[in-house]
Amino acid sequence: MNSHSHSAGRVSAAAIILVLLGGCGGSSHGSRMAPAGARRPRPQTFGHGAVGSEASRTVEVTMSDDLRFQPAQVNVKRGEIVTFHLVNRGKLVHEFTLGGPDSQELHEDQMAEMDMGGSAGGSMDMGSIGNMRSGHSGGMPGMRMDRSHKKYLSALRKRIAKLDGTASASDSVHIPPGESRDLVWAFSGEGAPDFGCHIPGHWHSGMKGSISFS
């Protein structure tokens, strides 16, 4: 995980998603992948976070409630520093996570753990975040986890711990409905990262994109 600090916009966006997810338990989740207690630097296999003043250009990426990014494929130059201007045109919260495959899997599992911990095994569908904002969550907070859910959650936490040991530097930002955020990335690594949204249900529904070196 890179060492750059977050802007106030990212912090507030992360706070919004935590509130919307109902104060879910599980691992700490902010705009970065690693747990709060992690101290070792992440390998910069796919690059690292940067600041806006270092960027040479801006790429706008929009997201919508059909769970797609536009564009879904971005070309960059190796070594280039790019500001991604992220625009949410939908009515649901969306997310833009930039990182390699292990980082994407780690973040997906972390969000799943939050979902499991907060809804006691009740899976969150693609519209549930919006419903929760209106006070109409379909979950049953008082329901106790059954044995299968506990077993799944235990396996999930083991997978998170394993991925946490292999995931490289990454960055993530939540974008509330109708708003925009910026994420700056230096493509200094040997490989090109992917990007995706890990709001529960979105990643597996195809809300992801790729980056290639030109």
Image (cartoon, rainbow, N blue to C red):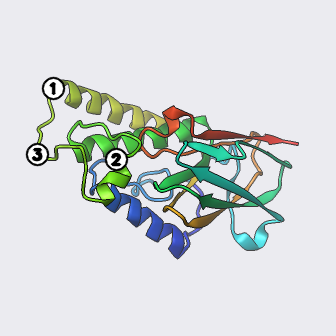
Q: CA distance from mark 1 to mark 3?
A: 16 Å
Query: SS of the residue at dot 3?
Result: loop
Q: Residues within 10 Å of mark 3 (few under 14, many from 20)?
A: few
Query: Marks 2 and 1: which is nearer the front?
Result: 2
Kindly identify the amino acid type of the residue bearing the numbered disc 1: Arg
The residue indicated by pointer 3 is 142
Q: CA distance from mark 2 to mark 1?
A: 24 Å
Badge 1: how crowded within 10 Å, few (<14), some, or many (20+)? few
- Left or right relative to 96: residue 36: left
Q: Which residue is mark 1?
A: 147
Q: Is residue 141 above or below residue 122?
A: below
Point out the image quarter for the C terminus.
Answer: top right
Query: Closer to the camera: disc 1 or disc 3?
Result: 3
Residue under label 2, please give it: 128
Q: Going 50% across and 32% down the picture, which residue do you hit?
A: 204
Taking depth in this image into account, of 18 and 188 the one nearest to the observer is: 18
Tell me which corner region of the image, top left, top right, bottom left or bottom right, holds residue 60. bottom right
